[in-house]
Amino acid sequence: MIDNKALFLSKRAADSFGGYANAQLRRLQNALARDSYPQDEKERHIMGSVQSAMRSFADRYATLPEGSLTLTIDKSEREDLDSEIFVDVNLKHYPLRDYKNIWSDMNTIVKDYGKLNKRNHKKDDLHLNKHAMHLIRLYLMCLDILEKGEVITYRENDLDLLMGIRNGKYQKADGTFYMEFFDMVTDYENRLKYAVENTNLPDQPDMKRIEEFVMNVNERVVRGEY
């Protein structure tokens, strides 16, 4: 597998790692927003999390026609909200089970965000710093794949940076993060976009070669060569 790792690498790594990194960033932003942002700003963060989830729907559910499910934020008529998210739906002959799962995913995000559990600052700060560290680690790993064609899980050269983040180097006393950290995230996002446009990796893995490799391995196992 290691000798043939190039067979499995493609630009799809940017979606896989980038999507996961975006989820980590949303977790971090949402946790910070829950404590320190005004209600309308919190609503924008909730919508960002839902929109992030929606980008993965195409991989799991029947394709949603463009413009069939849109989110907007507008003034709320509820007494407990200044603004809220509104949804416009225009679907015909769409699979019911997929529709149910989509709404379940969106409902989970809103419900989890609205939980009012008593905040444990020490525990929550540890989680925030862990999310922040994972966010940067994901960008670093994806850049190695796109720029070098290497999958490096043990980040020896980045250990000081990653452990500094995990130990709270970029977190303020009030639990929020210094702008220096978010500037770092922006730099990695821009670098990732450039890497995707300039990588030598193919758009998709060569599935025929992968299937041939798998069959070859299976045949050698049957022959007792392993």
Image: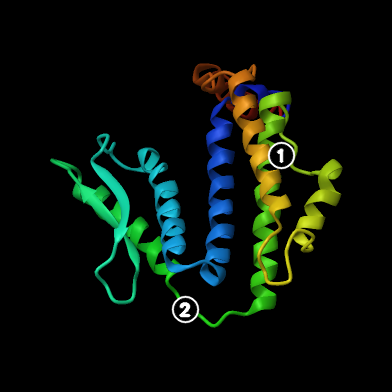
Q: Secondary structure at mark 2?
A: loop
Foreground mark, 2 or 1?
Answer: 2
- Kindly identify which residue carries mark 1: 140
Asked whether, in this view, residue 15 is left or right of residue 57, the answer is right
- Residue 142's place in the image compared with 135, above or below, is above
Q: Nearer the viewer, residue 163 or 193?
A: 193
Estimate the x, y position of residue 113 in percent, counting from the top left. 45, 67
The amino acid on which the numbered mark 2 sits, given as a three-letter code, is Leu
Residue at 63% x, 25% y: name it: 194
- Give how far apart the Cα atoms at labels 2 and 1 are: 34 Å
Among the 4 quarters of the image, the one containing residue 29: bottom right
Among the 4 quarters of the image, the one containing residue 127: bottom right
Using the rendered image of the protein, determine whether residue 139 is visible from the camera's viewpoint: yes
Which label sits on residue 116?
2
Estimate the x, y position of residue 117 in percent, counting from the top left. 50, 80
The amino acid on which the numbered mark 1 sits, given as a three-letter code, is Leu
Toward the bottom, the furthest residue is 118
